[in-house]
Image (cartoon, rainbow, N blue to C red):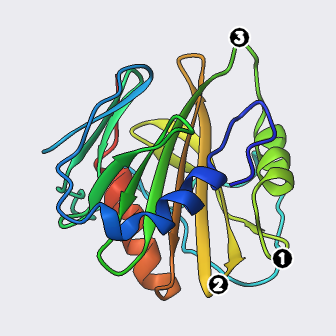
Amino acid sequence: MTTTSRSGRCRNGLLIGSLLATLVTGLTGCSDGGALGTTAGAATSGGASDGASSTPAPGSGSPSGSPSATAPADGKEVSSDVFTAHVPARWHLRSMISAAIVGFAPDGGAAAFNVVPAFGASVSDRRLISEADRDYGWSRKPRVEQPVFVDGQRMVHLSGPIGGGKRADYYVGIHADYEVSLDLETRRSAADQAAIADAILASWHWK
């Protein structure tokens, strides 16, 4: 992610992390204190899409689906002052300089978790979508998916291609005066990527 806005989303960190993926095989997790740390160790997402943008009015419509029957991810735990979540089994974790934690899949996929203070700002869905559309490194206009409820908390969801044969699913919302995001990037099919996102989000719990 291109980190130029208040949100501090970690596109640059994820790209750096992808270059370091071969160095983190066997990594058991680390903690750097602050907002995000890692330790070894319910929601539904809209389907990922690499099609053209379809932009419903922000905040309109219902969140995608009812509480998910998807089994939660049960790999290593991402722990922050705001939430805990798990990456899938056999994924590895690395804390990045960008203040994000990135989980790496054996096949080169990655998921970045980012927590940034909102400084008391009341941020609408429309603004979150606008910032993600503007600042994220999409290779073409992203699709605005239906919002999701993550452990009862509403988050907006954008998806689209980011180049290099990869597609991103980006979730972001405000909780406890923090802007919290999940950025999932893989070269898998839309259905496979949606299943990974569902599993991660189903493991998510707010503090």
Q: Which mark is residue 140?
A: 1
Q: Earlier in the sequence, mark 1 or mark 3?
A: 3
Mark 3 and mark 2: Cα distance apart in space: 37 Å
Q: For the view shown, which residue lies furthest in the left direction?
A: 41
Mark 2: which amino acid? Answer: Gly
Residue at the image position 83 percent from the left and 74 percent from the top: 53
Contact between labelled residues 1 and 2, with CB atoms less than 8 Å apart? no
Mark 3: which amino acid? Answer: Gly
Q: Residue 191 location in percent, x, y?
A: 45, 83
Q: Residue 171 location in percent, x, y?
A: 58, 51
Residue 51 lies left or right of residue 83; in this view the side is right
Q: Residue 30 location in percent, x, y?
A: 25, 38
Residue at the image position 75 percent from the left and 52 percent from the top: 2
Mark 1: which amino acid? Answer: Arg
Q: Which residue position holds label 3?
A: 120
Residue at the image position 34 percent from the left and 43 percent from the top: 204
Q: Earlier in the sequence, mark 2 or mark 1?
A: 1
Label 2 SS: loop
For the N terminus, the image quarter is bottom right
Mark 2 and mark 1: Cα distance apart in space: 13 Å
Q: Which mark is residue 92?
A: none
Q: Is residue 2 above or below residue 195?
A: above
Q: Which residue position holds label 2?
A: 164
Contact between labelled residues 2 and 3, with CB atoms less than 8 Å apart? no
Mark toward the viewer: 3 or 2: 2
Residue 19 lies left or right of residue 23; in this view the side is right
Q: Is residue 3 above or below residue 62?
A: above
Viewer-proximal residue, 174 or 55? 174
